[in-house]
Image (tube, helix red, strand yellow):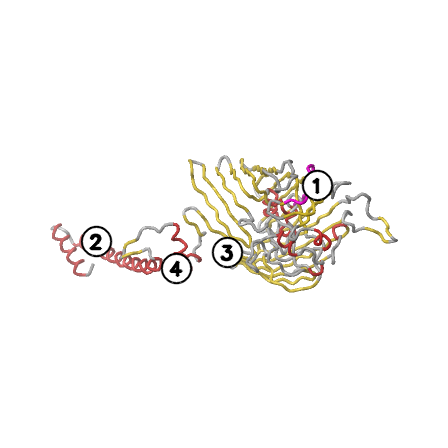
């Protein structure tokens, strides 16, 4: 409205009132001025809205158009990526959230093996059998795996919601899906000194190699889910590790075998998982259905975990008991085995594993203290699995060992402690110490003389692995950080059997973006 319109409105109001006095006129003029100012502000907001919405095509002839269908969301993000990426909240559409992490850096290793794009960790950050030479390398996953996923929640009844989660890990360096068995196949028959990084893993190139589940959630009755899921031990290690999830600086993060004794059981396929909170206490259980593969002779034993824990003020504690029947640890074929076995097949050690995991953390001001203990018992499997057979990930096993612990059960123990210090809102400093040790489980005791040489490092001898890691993380924003740190690891005795070198150090720097 222009000044003439405002004047006409004022004249009509005065004429209608007739006996309006001077004070009334002052009030009316103030109201008209305020209305004029609000109108100007509305015009500016409308112009700004029209310019912004013109980019996404959601405004037609000055009117807000109907919201686009879900399948148009990708097109909108493509047209206005900056607006999508700079928003404070997650990328959510109709209750479905897209999330992910990208992690990459550079590392130097005093004794290492070349990067392998299929190997989930990328590099062997901790000392391994084939660690042999100093090297600089691209370092994917210094602070954790890169991955992308979807999650959703939809109310289905009052107090109940349907939930789902999908997540997969990949290498930023190669773009490949994480696939431990593939890295083993690539090194079949290759001498240790010429191998690339490799190792067994639960991540075997599946479309969703981390997890894929569907279930029902209730704030009162807990969460019940079915599918491929992280085990309770895997969940707890991420919560109680002072350098949570780190591949380059934490032995807990790097070694998946510390989940129930072998890395393939850091996730359970065909499993039902239940978690519930009762006041300060919490309880959990996971049970795996089905067989470990499709061979003629498979185990019928149970595979499950149960847990209990609590939060009291600044103290958290959890205990997990685990039993895995027919646990499988895959390895590459030797040069001699390659000549006799089918191409692309692998070797396996079969065992029944039981484990107890105890974990705790305590917060005190800017400090968080962490600690834990795990005891894993390996025994020969109750049900023999005869090769050749195809495992649950589609890899052929041509050589199977079912009697690795025929004389004594192997007992592997782990103790760790560490602290995380929040220097300020941007900088976190963490340090962790990890100590593993195994008993002597062979036919005869170690520390015996053979040809005047004291035998202490046969594979069945007692031995240790130690690692200490520390890292500084600088958070530019809640999504983007830079980090720098290192881990020193060393092995001795039976745990050093077949190693080219017994120690390595891996200073690493990198960047991590989480959305």
Question: Does the magenta run of residues contain 385?
Answer: yes
The disc placed on residue 377 is: 1
* Residue 288, image quadrant: top right
Q: Going from the N terminus, do you reach mark 4 or mark 1 first?
A: 4
Q: Which residue is mark 2?
A: 27
Q: Nearer the viewer, mark 4 or mark 3?
A: 4
Q: Quadrant of the N terminus?
A: bottom left
Rendered residue at 73%/47% (across/down) = 437
Cα–Cα gap, marks 4 and 1: 56 Å
Secondary structure at numbered mark 3: loop
Which stretch did the figure color magenta? Answer: 372-389
Cα–Cα gap, marks 4 and 3: 23 Å
The disc placed on residue 479 is: 3
Secondary structure at numbered mark 4: helix
Question: Does the magenta run of residues contain 467?
Answer: no
Q: Which residue is mark 4?
A: 79
Q: Nearer the viewer, mark 2 or mark 4?
A: 4
């Amino acid at each position: 409205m222009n000044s003439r319109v405002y004047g006409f409105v004022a004249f009509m109001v005065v004429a209608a009132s007739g006996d309006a006095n001077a004070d009334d006129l002052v009030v009316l003029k103030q109201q008209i001025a305020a209305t004029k100012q609000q109108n100007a502000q509305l015009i500016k907001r409308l112009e700004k809205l029209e310019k912004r919405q013109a980019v996404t095509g959601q405004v037609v002839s000055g009117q807000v158009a109907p919201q686009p269908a879900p399948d148009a969301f990708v097109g909108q993000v493509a047209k206005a990526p900056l607006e999508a990426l700079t928003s404070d909240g997650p990328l959510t559409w109709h209750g479905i959230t897209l999330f992910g992490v990208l992690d990459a850096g550079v590392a130097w290793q005093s004794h290492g093996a070349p990067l392998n794009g299929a190997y989930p960790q990328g590099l062997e950050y901790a000392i391994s059998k084939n660690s042999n030479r100093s090297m600089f390398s691209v370092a994917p996953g210094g602070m954790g795996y890169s991955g992308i996923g979807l999650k959703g929640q939809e109310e289905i009844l009052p107090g109940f919601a349907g939930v789902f989660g999908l997540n997969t890990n990949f290498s930023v360096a190669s773009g490949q899906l994480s696939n431990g068995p593939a890295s083993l196949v690539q090194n079949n028959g290759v001498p240790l000194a010429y191998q690339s990084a490799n190792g067994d893993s639960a991540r075997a190139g599946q479309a969703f190699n981390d997890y894929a589940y569907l279930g029902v959630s209730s704030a009162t009755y807990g969460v019940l889910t079915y599918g491929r899921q992280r085990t309770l031990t895997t969940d707890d290690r991420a919560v109680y590790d002072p350098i949570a999830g780190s591949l380059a600086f934490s032995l807990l993060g790097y070694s998946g075998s510390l989940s129930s004794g072998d890395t393939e059981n850091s996730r359970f396929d065909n499993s039902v998982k239940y978690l519930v909170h009762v006041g300060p206490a919490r309880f959990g259980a996971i049970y795996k259905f089905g067989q470990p593969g499709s061979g003629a002779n498979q185990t019928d034993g149970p595979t499950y975990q149960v847990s209990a824990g609590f939060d009291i003020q600044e103290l958290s504690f959890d205990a997990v008991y685990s039993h895995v029947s027919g646990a499988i640890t895959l390895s590459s074929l030797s040069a001699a085995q390659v000549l006799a076995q089918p191409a692309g097949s692998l070797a396996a050690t079969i065992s029944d594993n039981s484990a107890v995991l105890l974990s705790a953390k305590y917060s005190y001001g800017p400090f968080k203290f962490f600690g834990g203990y795990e005891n894993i018992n390996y025994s020969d499997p109750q049900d023999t699995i005869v090769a050749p057979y195809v495992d649950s990930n589609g890899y052929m096993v041509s050589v199977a060992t079912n009697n690795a612990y025929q004389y004594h059960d192997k007992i592997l123990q782990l103790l760790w402690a560490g602290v995380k210090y929040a220097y300020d809102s941007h900088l976190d400093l963490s340090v962790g110490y990890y100590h593993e040790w195994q008993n002597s489980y062979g036919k005869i005791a170690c520390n015996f003389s053979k040809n005047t040489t004291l035998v202490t490092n046969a594979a069945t001898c007692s031995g240790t692995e130690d690692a200490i890691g520390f890292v500084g993380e600088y958070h530019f924003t809640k999504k983007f950080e830079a980090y720098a740190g290192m881990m020193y690891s060393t092995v001795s005795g039976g745990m050093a059997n077949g190693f080219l070198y017994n120690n390595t150090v891996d200073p690493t720097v990198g960047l991590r973006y989480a959305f």
